[in-house]
Image (tube, rainbow, N blue to C red):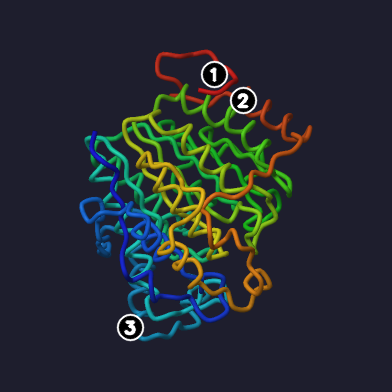
Amino acid sequence: MKAPDFIGHEIFRGSSYGRWHPLRVPRVSTVIDLSRALGWLPSAQYITSPRAKPKALTQWHTPDYVAALNRVEADQHASDQDLRRHDIGSVTNPVFPEIFRRPATAAGGSILAGELLRDGGVIYNPAGGTHHGMPDRANGFCYLNDPVLAMKSLRHHGVQRIAYIDIDAHHPDGVEVGMGGDPDCLMISVHEDRLWPRTGPIENDAGGNAFNLPVPRGLNDTEMAHIRDHLILPRVQAFKPDAIVLLCGADAVEEDPLSHLSLSNNAHWAVLRGLMGMAPRLLVLGGGGYNPWSVGRMWTGVWGILNGYDLPDRLPPKAEAVLRGLRFDGNRRGKNPPDHWFTTLRDTPNEGEIRPEILQMVRQLAARDFGAGHDRQQKTPPQNGGV
């Protein structure tokens, strides 16, 4: 079997949304450096991401919006119309030097992944996962929507049935706009209730193909394991996808500054392990995550798991040096980081009780019909339990 491919680019090393923006922190470059320090990223598995051309982006985004991003990057100025129509130049979606090139590079990697996965395989694009982007405007730090573009690329290359699993702390509102109502796309999102963008209530099925699970604050590893074994894996197994797209946002980890969940990175890795092998194609994307140590450690662990490596109990000196070189200015978590953020990839598991409201929501979603085109040669609801 062909080894997984890692799609990356050096543009993410020096690019920042601004001095005080949550995306000022290094993320993709940390994963690249850590993976190389561990000996996990040989050149044969590394693909430099192409920058998506405007024509490719207009497979979903409007030509006027793509043109506006290009113009704003060239001028380094957003007009009042850019702000009103496209939300370019807002506090959330600021003008910065690579405002077109950076998201277009992340999107180019996801579009390329759809092509490379035509005949099967595993691809990791940690720069991807900008799941809030809308067709005609920036939204939630996301100028483009590379998950939607990835799925459209998969479809263009003959891959029909896609399971999209999103375990980022925020609801993927842009992906629902792009894929809602598609009977050949299963969408499952586990996200924090009442967290921005405050969409994705459990009642919302996005036209029949979405399962939204808005979880309460403090979600622990035991609760996530229940969600995994009684909702995510049974639904994916019943759907029998041709491809799985997993968005593995690190902002659901306890130390993230923008959310209020209490997962360790073990919970995300367990979802990944459960999904591996359930379809002939797997694309793993990054997503949110605003604590540089949490993001770097979790996403590097994702790459190790995709390759079947054992995660070390103690990082070697070169890898530890990568983590000790990070800074998190302007945040209290960056002033006195705990030692394990430097010395290991793995968090201490955060286990606990499963709250009644989570049990009830999982039962409710597990019993829901998918809609037209649900199961391949299967008419009964999927059984609860792990795979």
The kind of residue on which mark 3 rests is Ala
The kind of residue on which mark 2 rests is Ala
Residue at image mark 2: 366
Numbered tag placed on residue 350 in the rendering: none
Q: Is residue 357 left or right of residue 328?
A: right
Q: Locate the N terminus and report the quarter of the image it occupies.
A: top left
The kind of residue on which mark 1 rests is Pro
Q: Indicate which disc, 2 or 3, sits on the residue closer to the N terminus.
A: 3
Q: Indicate which disc, 1 or 2, sits on the residue closer to the N terminus.
A: 2
Q: Residue furthest right?
A: 356
Where, by quadrant of the figure, is residue 151 drawn?
Answer: top left
**What secondary structure is found at the residue carrying circle 1?**
loop
Mark 2 or mark 3: which is in front?
A: 2
Numbered tag placed on residue 74 in the rendering: 3
Q: Position of residue 350 (x, y in %)?
A: 68, 44
Residue at image mark 1: 382
Query: Residue at image x 50%, y 82%?
Result: 80
**Cα–Cα gap, marks 2 and 3:** 49 Å
- Vertical relation: 149 (above or below) 245: below
Where, by quadrant of the figure, is residue 220 drawn?
Answer: top right
Mark 1 or mark 3: which is in front?
A: 1
**Cα–Cα gap, marks 1 and 3:** 52 Å
**Cα–Cα gap, marks 1 and 2:** 8 Å
Q: Position of residue 179 (x, y in %)?
A: 44, 43
Which sits in the foreground, 234 or 323? 323
Q: Is residue 239 left or right of residue 234?
A: left
Label pair 1/2, CB-CB below 8 angstroms: yes
**What secondary structure is found at the residue carrying circle 2?**
helix
Label pair 2/3, CB-CB below 8 angstroms: no
Q: Position of residue 161 (x, y in %)?
A: 36, 31
**What secondary structure is found at the residue carrying circle 3?**
helix
